[in-house]
Amino acid sequence: MYEYHDNFSDFTNITIKIPSQVLSNTELTNNQKVILGLDYTLSLKKGFNKLTNIQLGKMLNIHPNIVCKARKSLVRLNYLTRDRTIYRLTDKYKSFKVKDKRQIILLGYIYTNRGLSTGSKLLWGEYNSFCRTNENYFGSRKFTSVRLGCSKESVSNWTKELLNEGLIDYQLKSGYCTKQKVVVTKDFPNTK
């Protein structure tokens, strides 16, 4: 189903799944988390990732040199193995212990979005993981920063980015004697 060729628009069909052990791992950068998430997704489909650094960079809107550096460090840290042009995921990511086992997903519209930083893309996935279950996102910045392995300030900055791009919104939810502001992901604009 996934051919490796130069038609990058075909790669937007892939839904990148990022396991909670990768998402919360403070040893990894945001770019490494997204790349490792793609490797995880492709390992479920094909068992390997054969995309070049240039293909991966165009797909994820990350400079190919940054992709190359991230992949080399993932191999050095033993998250990936490399055999010429083929990258395979190891089980090392499973050794990172987490309480929250939710994985996030990144859709093509998100990971190809040039207006978003990699951290914002991960935060969108976190917010969307609650919206998909008909629950609302009540997580504090502290909870979210621990979950994403980043600072509270980064969560604030990425939330502003997502608001500016029109990808999230706030809603006021009323409960028994309470009112809470919750984050909801919005439907994508028509891209056709």
Image (spheres, rainbow, N blue to C red):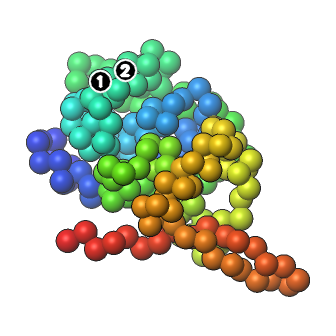
| 60 with respect to 142 (left or right) | left
State the image coordinates of residue 166 (x, y, percent, origin top left): 44, 66
Rendered view: 68 above or below 59: above
The residue identified by callout 1 is 65
Q: At label 2, which amino acid type do we have?
A: Lys
Against 138, residue 67 (above or below) is above
The answer, for residue 84, to whether it is visible in the render is yes
Q: Is residue 114 left or right of residue 22?
A: left
| Total labels drawn | 2
Please tell me how crowded label 1 is: few (under 14), some (14-19), or many (20+) other residues with Cα within 10 Å: few
- Cα separation, mark 1 vs mark 2, equals 6 Å
What mark, if any, has residue 69 been given in the picture? 2
Residue at image coords 27%, 58%: 13
Q: Is any atom of residue 17 visible in this view?
A: no
In contact (CB < 8 Å): disc 1 and disc 2: yes
Q: Secondary structure at mark 1?
A: helix
- Mark 2: few, some, or many residues within 10 Å (few <14, many ≥20)? few
Q: Quadrant of the C terminus?
A: bottom left
Where, by quadrant of the figure, is residue 135 drawn? Answer: bottom right
Q: Position of residue 101 (x, y in %)?
A: 64, 50
Give amino acid for label 1. Answer: Asn
Instruction: Pinpoint residue 186: horizontal percent, then vertical percent.
Output: 47, 72
Q: Viewer-proximal residue, 41 or 117? A: 117
Where disc 2 sits, the SS reads helix
* Residue beneath the point at 42% across and 61% down: 165
Left or right: 176 as drawn, with respect to 61 = right
